[in-house]
């Protein structure tokens, strides 16, 4: 089984392979053993608050600051979805492929496009889908800011 993500038949192995500004993606994992699939989302990097050290606090740019925001990479390279039946199939030796459907540039966009992809593909009604539920809360204003 390959750990590679594919996008337009090209391997995506590092964040450098992402479009500029992308923070995550919508994906489809297909179990080629039984032809079942799973649609989901994965955030590949996120901004986190990091406490400044005493030395960093003394720098001119950090005057009066206690925290800074830094990008942190997630476990996206080794990620195989959150569906327990899919993960059990993988543990039992089933072969699966991982395809990136769409790159996203905000949390609102990731949530919106995951829900849209699952609903538009009828994944919840398809017996060949591992998807069993969906939940989404997206503010249109947040989404519109990203898509400008």
Image (tube, helix red, strand yellow):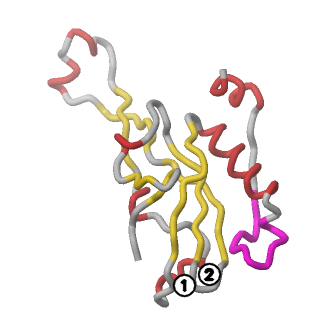
SS class of the residue under badge 2? helix
Q: Position of residue 124 (x, y in %)?
A: 80, 67
Location of residue 22 in the rendering, given as x and y in whole percent from the top left corner: 49, 36
Q: Position of residue 112 (x, y in %)?
A: 72, 43
Residue holding disc 1? 88
Q: Secondary structure at mark 1?
A: helix
In the picture, measured across the screen, residue 129 lies left or right of residue 70, that is right
Identify the disc placed on residue 40: none
Residue 124 magenta: yes
In the image, 9 versus 30, the foreground residue is 9
Report x, y in % for residue 15: 37, 44
Q: Between marks 2 and 1, how big is the CA–CA gap? A: 5 Å
Q: Contact, CB < 8 Å: mark 2 with mark 1? A: yes
Query: Which portion, as a residue range, is magenta?
Result: 123-134
Q: Is residue 72 left or right of residue 31?
A: left
Residue under the image location 51 percent in, 85 percent down: 94
Give the residue at mark 2: 85
Above or below residue 20? Residue 121 is: below
Q: Is residue 97 magenta?
A: no
Q: Residues within 10 Å of mark 2 (few under 14, many from 20)?
A: few
* Quadrant showing the C terminus: top right
In the image, taking residue 45 as reference, residue 121 lies left or right, namely: right
Quadrant of residue 64 within the rendered picture? top left
């Amino acid at each position: 089984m390959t750990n590679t993500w594919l996008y337009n038949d090209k391997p995506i192995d590092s964040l450098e392979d992402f479009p500029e500004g992308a923070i995550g993606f919508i994906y489809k994992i297909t179990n080629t053993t039984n032809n079942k699939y799973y649609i989901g989302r994965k955030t590949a990097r996120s901004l986190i608050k990091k406490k400044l050290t005493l030395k960093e606090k003394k720098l001119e740019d950090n005057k009066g600051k206690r925290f800074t925001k830094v990008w942190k990479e997630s476990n996206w390279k080794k990620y195989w979805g959150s569906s327990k039946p899919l993960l059990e199939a993988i543990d039992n030796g089933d072969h699966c492929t991982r395809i990136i459907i769409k790159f996203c540039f905000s949390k609102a966009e990731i949530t919106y496009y995951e829900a849209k992809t699952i609903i538009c593909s009828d994944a919840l009604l398809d017996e060949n889908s591992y998807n069993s539920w969906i939940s989404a809360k997206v503010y249109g204003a947040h989404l519109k800011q990203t898509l400008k």
